Amino acid sequence: MLTKPGYRRIPLWGNWDNQTPLANPHKGWYLHYFDNCIVKYLDHEHPDDYLEDFPCFNHIYLRLAWSYLEPEEGKFNWDIIDEVIERWTKRDRRVSFRISCKETGEEQAWATPEWVAKAGCKGEFTGVHGGHAGCFEPDYGDPIFLEKFGNFMRAFGERYNGKPWLEFVDIGSFGEWGEGHTEGTSERTWPVEVMKEHIDLHTKNFPDTYVIYNYDMSAVRRTYDGTEEDLLDYAVRSGCGIRADSACVSFYQDRYGLSSMHIPAMFQPFIGVGPMDLEFGHYNPKHFPDVWNHGYTGLAAVLETSATFAGFHGYARQFLGDHPHFSKEIGNLLGYWYFPVAAYLPGSVRAGQRSSLGITWENRGASPAYWRFPLYLKLTPVVGGKPTYYHLWEADNRSWHPKAQYDDIYSFRPDANLLPGEYIVSIGMFDPLEQREGLPGRPIMLGLHGSLRDNEGYYRIDTLQIAPCEYPAYDGVVKVESLWPEHPKSAFVLAEKAKKG
């Protein structure tokens, strides 16, 4: 950005901090609280551990079968998740969901509730071996299945859609573990119209929450008839994000290289549309280091897919103890990671007069943000006095994509009654979805040294001289001589008409 005459350029990169893990909203790590069942992982590790020290930890993932929440038709067991949600959201943690309709464990033969089959839904038992009778796989296009699951999703959405703590809901109603494929069991492929209905069941019932499409719904479809791309395009047009359930899995790493991503290009159409989500494999320290590859596999997957979130099956303390460095590094890279490069300020501003300031931004994260964070200017007298705040309306951080710098110009008008003198100039960005008393929302941490950050979440940029106002302050009613004497509301015209009767 060229410096405007009368303005000064203030370099900020000398104050960058790229080492401290930043606990920012709508990005970072999540962990499987319920992992396709209700007996693992988090509460069974440390019931009172809310992972306050896990770098860039964002939310818990509640992934469980439909039958747990609607054991009888129309009778919902919300308590199983509400108790967990209440405890974690009180500690500023967020939540995401997957509701599955097909599992593979012997104890979960009926992920789709048995009463659905008794109502006439077609299906078959798959995975039969030894004494295991297998698990029920519904016909995902059966009208009875779609009706009953649609009723559940309507109730589910009415209860949780748009909640300020809800990060996303992913589409888990199709395939093994809700992963969008039938590999290893029935190997069946359903018509593309059926798959679109499953997308609609989620987007229509969660219109105010991001819905995440599983890329296996396209990547493992294997019809090779164009329906793979058709589904992907439909998900994009529906405003979905996208996820992969196969990062850091040896089967995929052996075949597709370091990142273990099958078709990473499928993520690209979703950039700027909805968040990207990666699920790393089951963490087993006996053999996982070979797959984890000292963290480089996860790092490659995050960068290749422009990931916003990443999580894994396993115990958080064990993982963090084994990989403290990469937990921090990947946590910061996930999603957005904002660094002000330089600021442009006028030499002085007159109170009551509109002026402007410029900031060059760099997003060093893996993806753009999918939430708008309002930007504010704070002017604080160097000697005594209270600060004043100004919303910089032009700011829209969602346009800041990685690997580029963005020059933004904002307008502001200092209050006319500000006393002349020197003022500290600070900027702050906030998430309005998470309210904080006396603030516009939860402060967004920037990649600047913490010494520049005040107790309200604003970062000091420089100082600015405020000159005295040259016209009277606006009191709400201003008496001004009419500039247009013939205007019908002119006091002069009205008085003359009154005289004439």
Image (cartoon, rainbow, N blue to C red):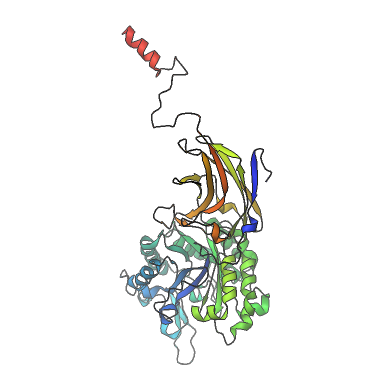
Q: How many numbered callouts?
A: 0
In the image shown, does 418 or 395 lie closer to the viewer?
418
Q: Is residue 245 visible?
A: no
Residue at 52%, 40% in the rendered image = 421
Residue at 39%, 14% in the rendered image = 492
Residue 247: which quarter of the image? Answer: bottom right
How far across and how far down the image is residue 175, in percent? 50, 74
Residue 358, compared with residue 245, is above or below; it is above
Residue 501: which quarter of the image? Answer: top left
Residue at 63%, 79% in the rendered image = 294
In the image shown, does 16 or 270 lie closer to the viewer?
16
Residue 495, compared with residue 364, is above or below; it is above
In the image shown, does 154 or 54 lie closer to the viewer?
54
Left or right? Give the position of 449 relative to 45: right
Left or right? Give the position of 250 relative to 393: right
Q: Return the residue found at the far top.
A: 500
Q: Is residue 83 visible?
A: yes
How far across and how far down the image is residue 487, in percent? 43, 17
Residue at 40%, 67% in the rendered image = 91
Residue 486, compared with residue 450, is above or below; it is above
How far across and how far down the image is residue 486, in percent? 44, 14
Residue 241: which quarter of the image? Answer: bottom right
Q: Return the residue found at the far front.
A: 383
How far across and how far down the image is residue 208, in percent? 44, 56
In the image shown, does 306 or 119 lie closer to the viewer?
306
